[in-house]
């Protein structure tokens, strides 16, 4: 006889996978075990599909609820939840959509999903104290190249060859949804961040995006600056750093010895 823990593990696996291992342990009353278990399976699937729809509202609006449900159920079959917090579920949905054959004509859909996830992640991220504006002024200028910066926990940096922000804007609940978006109008580099309780999306130029992306990877200011200036040669690094300290994109720094 399996232990209680084993039965619970089999039952959890059966809710989204093969129920064969648990069916012999389901007692039939008015209905057969298969039908009883299917009630639970349907409820779990509906809950997870709804959760994904809440996390990816723009994707759902773009493709419609029926197609979204179809895609979400396919995702569930390949990506079972590994924890009990639904806020953490769905982080691979964007990558899944990029390879999802029925959505092959919607090249931009994966990037829209990345933006949806970035906003979801930002909303649930931890808080961080602001960096005092005069903190950098107290650093010896000779040590600036060795600075490493920490970005706010809510920050995501999203780049796309498509007009991602425009797609997102016209698919908000207060929009009619019938506006046309020219996919050829150009790509974007976006900063997603939560300030207070508000999740914000900002457009960045290529150099600014390269700088923040490099800093997020842990590069020193010297190495990050090289990448930023390669993208935007006339970028004013001092102004960009001050703006992102004041805007709480940057919340801490250390100096590499």
Image: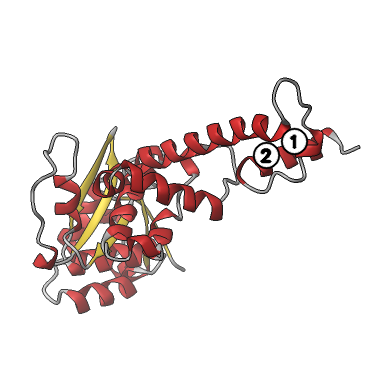
Crowd class of label 1 (few under 14; some 14 to 19; many from 20; radius 10 Å): few
Decide if residue 154 is in sight here: no
Q: Nearer the viewer, residue 170 or 253?
A: 170
In screen coordinates, is 149 left or right of 184?
right
Which disc number belongs to residue 12? Answer: 2
Q: Residue furthest top?
A: 30
From this view, report whether residue 166 is shown above or below residue 223.
above
In screen coordinates, is 156 left or right of 82?
left
Which disc number belongs to residue 17? Answer: none
From this view, report whether residue 102 is shown above or below residue 178.
below
Give the x, y percent position of residue 2: 87, 39
Badges 1 and 2: C-beta atoms under 8 Å apart? yes
Crowd class of label 2 (few under 14; some 14 to 19; many from 20; radius 10 Å): some
Q: Nearer the viewer, residue 76 or 24?
A: 24
Q: Residue at x 44, y 40 (%)?
A: 49
Q: Residue at x 31, y 71 (%)?
A: 224
Q: CA distance from mark 1 to mark 2?
A: 6 Å
Quarter residue 183 falls in: bottom left
Residue, disc 1: 8
Q: Residue at x 55, y 55 (%)?
A: 78
- Report the quarter where the N terminus lies: top right
Query: What element does badge 2 sit on?
Result: helix
In screen coordinates, is 81 left or right of 211?
right
Give the x, y percent position of residue 155: 33, 50
Decide if residue 257 is in sight here: yes
């Amino acid at each position: 006889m399996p232990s209680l823990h084993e039965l619970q593990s089999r039952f959890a696996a059966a809710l989204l996978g093969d129920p064969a291992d648990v069916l012999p342990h389901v007692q039939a009353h008015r209905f057969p075990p298969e039908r009883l278990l299917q009630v639970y399976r349907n409820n779990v699937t509906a809950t997870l599909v709804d959760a994904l729809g809440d996390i990816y509202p723009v994707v759902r609006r773009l493709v419609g609820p029926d197609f979204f449900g179809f895609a979400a159920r396919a995702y569930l079959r390949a990506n079972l939840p590994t924890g009990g917090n639904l806020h953490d579920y769905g982080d691979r949905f964007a990558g899944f959509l990029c390879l999802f054959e029925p959505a092959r004509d919607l090249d931009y859909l994966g990037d829209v999903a990345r933006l949806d996830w970035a906003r979801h992640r930002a909303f649930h991220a931890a808080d961080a104290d602001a960096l005092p504006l005069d903190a950098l002024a107290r650093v010896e200028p000779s040590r600036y190249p060795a600075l490493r910066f920490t970005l706010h926990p809510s920050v995501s940096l999203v780049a796309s060859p498509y007009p991602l922000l425009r797609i997102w804007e016209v698919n908000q609940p207060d929009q009619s949804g019938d506006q046309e978006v020219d996919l050829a109008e150009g790509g974007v580099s976006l900063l997603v961040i939560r300030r207070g309780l508000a999740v914000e999306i900002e457009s960045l130029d290529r150099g600014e995006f390269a700088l923040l992306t490099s800093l997020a990877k842990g590069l020193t200011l010297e190495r990050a600056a090289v990448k930023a200036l390669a993208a935007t040669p006339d970028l004013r690094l001092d102004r960009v750093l001050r703006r992102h300290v004041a805007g709480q994109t940057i919340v801490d720094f250390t100096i590499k010895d």
